[in-house]
Image (cartoon, grey):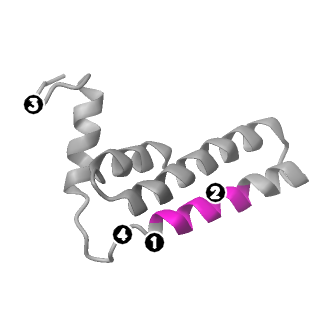
Amino acid sequence: MLGLVRGMFVSAKGNAYKRSLLSQAGRDLKRAMELALANAPDTPGHEQAWVLAESALEMVGRTMHWNESLVPVQAALRFRVNGGRWGAKR
Protein backbone atom coordinates (compact mmCIF):
# COMPACT_ATOMS: atom_id res chain seq x y z
CA MET A 1 0.00 0.00 0.00
CA LEU A 2 2.85 2.35 0.77
CA GLY A 3 4.21 1.91 -2.76
CA LEU A 4 0.80 2.69 -4.22
CA VAL A 5 0.53 5.83 -2.09
CA ARG A 6 3.97 6.91 -3.27
CA GLY A 7 2.90 6.43 -6.88
CA MET A 8 -0.28 8.40 -6.26
CA PHE A 9 1.81 11.21 -4.73
CA VAL A 10 4.10 11.38 -7.76
CA SER A 11 1.17 11.39 -10.18
CA ALA A 12 -0.64 14.18 -8.27
CA LYS A 13 1.70 16.95 -9.46
CA GLY A 14 0.05 20.34 -9.24
CA ASN A 15 -2.56 19.28 -6.67
CA ALA A 16 -1.28 20.51 -3.30
CA TYR A 17 -4.31 19.27 -1.34
CA LYS A 18 -4.08 15.74 -2.73
CA ARG A 19 -0.30 15.65 -2.23
CA SER A 20 -0.71 16.83 1.37
CA LEU A 21 -3.16 14.03 2.17
CA LEU A 22 -1.02 11.43 0.42
CA SER A 23 2.11 12.65 2.18
CA GLN A 24 0.43 12.26 5.58
CA ALA A 25 -0.97 8.87 4.57
CA GLY A 26 2.51 7.72 3.57
CA ARG A 27 4.00 8.83 6.88
CA ASP A 28 1.20 7.08 8.78
CA LEU A 29 1.62 3.86 6.81
CA LYS A 30 5.37 3.88 7.39
CA ARG A 31 4.84 4.40 11.13
CA ALA A 32 2.15 1.69 11.17
CA MET A 33 4.60 -0.80 9.65
CA GLU A 34 7.24 0.13 12.22
CA LEU A 35 4.77 -0.34 15.09
CA ALA A 36 3.43 -3.62 13.70
CA LEU A 37 6.93 -5.05 13.38
CA ALA A 38 7.99 -3.86 16.84
CA ASN A 39 4.90 -5.04 18.73
CA ALA A 40 3.31 -8.45 19.05
CA PRO A 41 -0.32 -8.92 17.99
CA ASP A 42 -2.95 -8.08 20.61
CA THR A 43 -0.78 -5.39 22.23
CA PRO A 44 -1.45 -1.65 22.42
CA GLY A 45 1.40 -0.92 19.99
CA HIS A 46 0.04 -3.34 17.43
CA GLU A 47 -3.46 -1.90 17.84
CA GLN A 48 -2.04 1.58 17.24
CA ALA A 49 -0.49 0.29 14.02
CA TRP A 50 -3.94 -0.78 12.80
CA VAL A 51 -5.46 2.58 13.77
CA LEU A 52 -2.76 4.44 11.82
CA ALA A 53 -3.12 2.18 8.79
CA GLU A 54 -6.90 2.57 8.72
CA SER A 55 -6.59 6.34 9.05
CA ALA A 56 -4.09 6.41 6.19
CA LEU A 57 -6.42 4.41 3.96
CA GLU A 58 -9.23 6.83 4.74
CA MET A 59 -7.00 9.73 3.66
CA VAL A 60 -6.11 7.90 0.44
CA GLY A 61 -9.81 7.34 -0.21
CA ARG A 62 -10.44 11.08 0.04
CA THR A 63 -7.97 11.72 -2.78
CA MET A 64 -9.69 9.55 -5.40
CA HIS A 65 -13.07 9.66 -7.10
CA TRP A 66 -14.79 6.28 -7.40
CA ASN A 67 -14.31 6.14 -11.16
CA GLU A 68 -10.88 7.79 -11.38
CA SER A 69 -8.32 5.83 -13.36
CA LEU A 70 -5.12 4.56 -11.78
CA VAL A 71 -3.30 4.62 -15.12
CA PRO A 72 -1.34 7.80 -14.19
CA VAL A 73 -0.32 6.13 -10.92
CA GLN A 74 0.83 3.05 -12.81
CA ALA A 75 2.87 5.23 -15.16
CA ALA A 76 4.47 7.09 -12.23
CA LEU A 77 5.38 3.81 -10.54
CA ARG A 78 6.81 2.35 -13.73
CA PHE A 79 8.89 5.51 -14.17
CA ARG A 80 10.25 5.18 -10.64
CA VAL A 81 11.00 1.46 -10.96
CA ASN A 82 12.82 2.11 -14.22
CA GLY A 83 15.16 4.53 -12.46
CA GLY A 84 13.54 7.65 -13.87
CA ARG A 85 13.62 6.56 -17.51
CA TRP A 86 10.35 6.60 -19.45
CA GLY A 87 9.76 3.49 -21.51
CA ALA A 88 12.71 1.55 -20.08
CA LYS A 89 12.21 -2.20 -20.07
CA ARG A 90 13.37 -4.63 -17.43
Does the magenta run of residues contain 24? Answer: no
Mark 2 or mark 1, earlier in chain: 2
Task: Please provide the residue range marked out in magenta.
Answer: 50-60
Image-based side of 35 in relation to 3, left or right: right
| Secondary structure category for the residue under label 4 | loop
Look at mark 3 in the image and give the residue it sits on: 87
The image shows residue 54 at horizontal and vertical percentages of 63, 64
Look at mark 2 in the image and give the residue it sits on: 53
As measured in the structure, the alpha-carbon distance from the residue carrying label 2 to the one carrying label 3 is 33 Å
Look at mark 1 in the image and give the residue it sits on: 62
Between label 2 and label 1, give the one nearer the viewer. Answer: 1
Mark 4 or mark 3, earlier in chain: 4
Is the C-beta separation of discs 4 and 1 under 8 Å? yes
Between label 3 and label 1, give the one nearer the viewer. Answer: 1
User: What crowding class fits label 4: few (fewer than 14 Cα within 10 Å), some (14-19), or many (20 or more)?
Assistant: few
| Secondary structure category for the residue under label 2 | helix
